Amino acid sequence: MQRRQVLKGILTSAAGMVALKAGASTIDEISTGFVSQPETNEPVVINSGVGGNNTVDLLNRIEKDCYAHKPKLTVLMIGTNDMNSRKHVPLEQYEKNLSLIITGIKDKGSKVLLMTILPFYEPYLMTRHPVAFYEPEGPVKRRAQVIEAIKQAAKQHKTHLLDLGMRFEAVGKIGTDKDSLIKNEVNSNKTDGLHPTANGYRFIGLSVYDYILYNDLPKTNIVCFGDSITHGDGPVESYPGYLKRLLSSSK
């Protein structure tokens, strides 16, 4: 009799009524007003891109911006700033840094998807950095060296590799046309030549999405780690933003 009275009091209390409306199904949930929430498979895609970063910067923040999120999959694109003057990292050191980044991420139990860096429109690039800095090999060959280092790192560490740079070269119309996937004066009012347009970010998001599905990689707890090309132009207009929308719509 006493138990019935206690139960009746709980059920008719304000907290109990709120808990019932929220979906409480046990006496503990009703009495405390706390309703446990079921786990969902909602894709979690974290944008850990920071503008201007090179491999040194990624190593300095890898603990808080990658490990702390306990990723199942880390999508990694870095190297554009390493090859340029203001944040230049010599190729040999770049290779060592990249190896340390990959090793650290894999040691935390995350799969790694490496991506090659994007092409650029050279006339614009030469207005951003001194021409002499790229001598004697020139910016095109230097980028090729960075891409080869990325491919060798993928082979050495047995990680997944998406040759994103090749895809942009094939379909991106890199240059001064309005439909270039890299920003220019016509499509963005900027002599940029390095960063993707909105369609460029969509293209990256779709490329990563297709690769994840085709290779049956984790679809939740994904960290996208990199520089401004990862960060994008906002929470939605970025490849991590488009990737999350694609993963959500595929459920």
Image: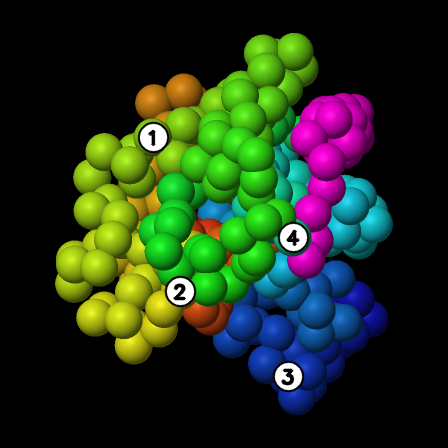
Front tag of 4 and 2: 4
Type of the residue with mark 3: Thr
Residue at numbered disc 3:
12
Classify residue 242 as left or right of residue 99. Answer: left
* Quadrant placement of the N terminus: bottom right
State how far apart marks 4 and 3 are (Cα).
70 Å
| SS at circle 4 | loop
Near-viewer residue (158 or 16): 158
Q: Earlier in the sequence, mark 1 or mark 3?
A: 3
Near-viewer residue (91 or 62): 91
Residue at numbered disc 1:
166
Front tag of 3 and 2: 2
- Residue at 45 percent across and 56 percent down: it is 125
State how far apart marks 4 and 2 are (Cα).
16 Å
State how far apart marks 4 and 1 are (Cα).
24 Å
Front tag of 4 and 1: 4
Q: Earlier in the sequence, mark 4 or mark 3?
A: 3
Residue 152 covered by magenta stretch: no
- For the record, the magenta segment spans 86-108
Residue at numbered disc 2:
192
Where residue 28 appears, as percent x and y from the top left, is 75, 62
